[in-house]
Amino acid sequence: MKNFWFTILLCVFGAVVLCASCAVLPQSSGVSVQSADESARPASTPDSFTVQYMDGNLTLYSGVVQKYTAATYVYPAEKAGYSFLYWAYGGNAYDFSSPVTHDITLCAVWSPTEFDINYVADGKTVKTQTCTVECVPEPPDIPQKTGYDAHWNIPDFTGEDITAVAVYEPKTYPVVFRLNGKIYARSTRVYGEQSEIIPPEEREGYRIVCEETFTGEYFAVDVRYVARTYTATCVVDGGIFASVPFTVDMPPVLPDVPEKEGFDGHWSDFEIGAHDITVYAVYVARSAEDGEAPDNQGESGGNPESGETSDNKGGEGVGGNGFDGNGGGFDDEKSGGKPDGGSESENESKPESGSASESEDSEYSAGLIFADCEGGVEVTGYTGEDTDVVIPAYYGGKAVVSVAQNAFAKNGNIVSVRVPNTVKSIGKSAFKMCAALAAVYLSEGLESIGNSAFAYCQNIAEIRLPASVREIGASAFTGIKPDAKIYLAAGSELTPDKFPQSVEVVKEY
């Protein structure tokens, strides 16, 4: 009996132990069976993973992939100056064919592309540098220019070839104005611009001439006074006999009064000033002791009643003014010709109107050839031997208004020429290749100078153009003496670009 109950107890205990064992199994691992391939994975492996695509600290893309599938290859956007190489993981190129087994971060790897930097100054390439966006520009020394600060203007890198240009900025320099070597004023100016002249005190009868030099540190404007040239017009019997230049420092040297039988002649009184003047021939009958007096007891070359001086203040003389001498057109007894000591032949014909008489004591160079033209006459040629040529203001009672084309061309003898104030134009090649021509005196009233008018006159070192000149033809002064000076009268509208670069153009004030 005792054994019976012991057996029952043992069975009950076994049943209790079996039930307790079944109650623990559901709380263990979720995967009850693992394959050989999964034996190394943790029990907590998720069903999907995150893949991040990074460029430096910038996230380009983020995606989710299922467990054991491969990540997608993503092409990043273009990056200026770089070429994309590959996606890296752990420092090496990532294999997109392998399945993703955990969260990963892929990094973009780039290679900088090469390009050229061309350094250009004044249109010329100074240097070419091969570079990348990660390199530092190495510009060459910039070519220097007097009066300018310079620097390279280098554009931003784009990965493509670029051009760096030399930029020049003009400097500002001090300017000193000197009169007789002493500084009387100061200013400043930007290099390349024209100095604004500060004139000294004006002096009546003088013009101001300025010459500018650059020392490298400042501009010096040397100012000097130059006496203006005025004209003394000599009138005989109502006609112009001669025109004589003078200045306030140098009185006019008047010619002898033309002789007239039975009269003593002299010029009327005049007063020197800063203006043109007119003087008249005054004739006084000789006394009976000296010879028989003519019926007209006294006469004046200009004003028969008084013979007084007439000052003409209306016009200003021009430096190197040409003689306004009359080349003819007066009656014989009033022409200014020298008497031959006897009476004129009744058979001698007087000149027709508009022509010059051979017996006249002309105030122009013999050998000049004239022809009628619109508005008067013009000089068309010269066959004379005078080296100092004087062109008259009037010929045959008509104004000389022009020097014609080729009038003096290739004349190797003339040294100087004086052009009166009646001449309005000098024609094309009028004095071209006059090898000995050194002095040209032009008068106010001249308006135009034709093409090549003074070309290759290699001895011309200085010439002054009146303010009335408005037109300069092409190559008008080509080939004159190197470093010659061309003075532009006060009020002239001409600009330096009308003249060769080899000459110095001086503006008068």
Image (cartoon, grey):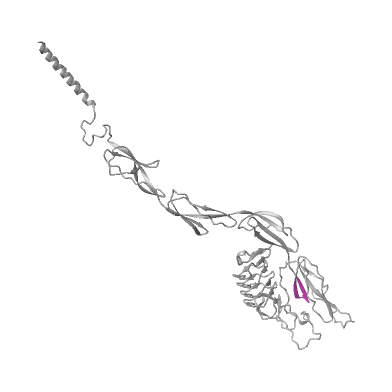
The x and y percentages for residue 150 are: 55, 54
The x and y percentages for residue 330 are: 75, 79
Identify which residue, 38 or 241, lies in the foreground: 38
Horizontally, residue 52 falls left or right of residue 150, namely left
Identify which residue, 78 or 338, lies in the foreground: 78
Q: Is residue 273 magenta?
A: no
Point out the residue furthest to the top here.
1
Q: Main secondary structure of the magenta part?
A: strand
Identify which residue, 129 or 210, lies in the foreground: 129
Point out the residue furthest to the right here.
289
Horizontally, residue 337 falls left or right of residue 52, namely right
Q: Quadrant of residue 171?
A: bottom right
The tally of labels here is: 0
Q: Is residue 234 magenta?
A: yes
Q: Quadrant of residue 28?
A: top left
The x and y percentages for residue 156 are: 47, 50
- Could you tell me which quadrant the N terminus lies in? top left
- Could you tell me which quadrant the C terminus lies in? bottom right
The x and y percentages for residue 269 are: 82, 70
Q: Is residue 362 visible?
A: yes
Point out the residue furthest to the left here.
1
**Residue range of the region highlighted in magenta in the rendering:** 232-244
Q: Is residue 196 visible?
A: no
Q: Relative to residue 80, is residue 292 depicted above or below? A: below
Q: Relative to residue 266, is residue 99 depicted above or below? A: above
